[in-house]
Amino acid sequence: MTVRELTQALVSIPSHEDETAAGDYIETWLRRETDADVTRDAVGNVIARKGTGGETLALVGHHDVVEPAPSQVNSGVGGDLEYVVEHRDGRLYGRGTADMKGAVAAAMLAFRDSKLQSSGPSQSASTGELVFASFVGEEIGGVGAQHAIEHGFAPEYAIVGEGSTGYSSPGVTDVAVAHKGRRGSTITADGTAAHASEVGAGENAIYRATAAVDRIRELEVPSIEVAGDQLEGSLVVTEIDGGSAMNVVPDRCELTVDERTVAGKRAPLEHVAALEGVHWTVDQDLPPMRCTDEAFAKTVLEAANAVQPGSPDLVTKPHATDAGWLSEAGTECVIYGAAEPGEAHTESESVSIDVLKRCRDTYRRVAESWLQ
């Protein structure tokens, strides 16, 4: 089975509401095509392992997708829903081709085909363990990755197959060594309601909220230097909701804040919570990622350079991925995948078949060179 055929098979399986069928396909394929130890955990993550001893390298992806557009679905045999997959002009089109079932297919093939070297007098023990992992729930905050980590998933190294193509130059698949995280917060300002004709009888929650906005705008946004560039976070108020009527001094006002974080640093939002009547709640905190092992990053970059005509580079990504959860847990991660900027989550989502082959070959080269 080619990477195109495997990608088409995976993409055709709906997995935006329930990943079970896609996970079934991946598990069945791994059991049929490999002699690896294949497991399916309580939330639906599919994990396969081969080799023993030494360090562990994981090829990581996810098989859930965001909801498809109407043009990306049709009724299959018996009226069951299927995703539309089209092959034209050297690309596959369909929900999940870029994000990220194409990279999952490439990792499955690389996992199957990688020949791990052996060590010791009997040559019976390999010098490292290769792991394939496809998680559920990446699109809803990384619930699958978190579950796996909580239950002992702890590779020393990982290549996460999210998109890294077209960052340094068009068509080149780069190696991302860092990405931003996302912290989403709610700032709540409490006051005391009063009739608007008696302003002094109340405490205006909107005024307290606007003071919070002013404080947020004064905060320094953190940044770090990675791969010769400054990776900068951001902080922005995105919503405001307060008041109940034109003639009532409001007793409550809420703000939502979107913060893009960088490894090791956060904006000091606790300074906002120090204001009178203002409270701060973190609603979501997707961790950033940064690879600190230069030798590992260089190994992946050399493998990537060997399989493509362009010259890949070490780059950074703006988007949070499951690599953040792995990095937070102690895994050295890089991101290397076929998706290009602007492809994921779109009605015209697509992926280059040649780049999928490139990913398959890179994953295999890294596995066979790093685990030795």
Image (tube, grey):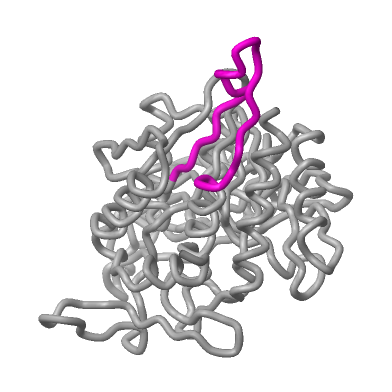
Q: Is residue 38 above or below residue 77?
A: above
Task: Give residue 57's position: percent from left, percent from top.
Answer: 59, 34
Number of marks in the rendered image: 0
Magenta part of the chain: 111-133
Q: As drawn, is 278 to the left or to the right of 250?
A: right
Residue at the image point whose x is 21% and y is 77% from the top? 81
The residue nearer to you, when weighing 70 against 369, is 369
Tell me the quadrant of the picture where the C terminus can be found.
Answer: top right
Residue 304, can we see it? yes
Q: Looking at the image, which is closer to me, 35 or 227?
A: 35
The residue sitting at 45% across, 68% down in the picture is 7
Q: Position of residue 205 (x, y in %)?
A: 40, 55
Does residue 56 show up magenta in the picture? no
Image coords of residue 83 (percent x, y): 32, 78
Q: Residue at x 38, y 55 (%)?
A: 140
Question: Residue drawn 64% across and 59% down?
Answer: 359
Q: Residue pushed farthest front?
A: 122
Specify the quadrant of the image occupied by residue 289. top right
Q: Is residue 142 left or right of residue 352?
A: left
Q: Residue furthest top?
A: 121
Q: Quadrant of residue 18?
A: bottom left
Q: Position of residue 318 (x, y in %)?
A: 65, 58
Q: Residue furthest right?
A: 228
Q: Is residue 127 magenta?
A: yes
Quadrant of the rendered image containing residue 224: top right
**Can residue 191 be seen by looking at this rendering?**
no
The front one of 318 and 338 is 338
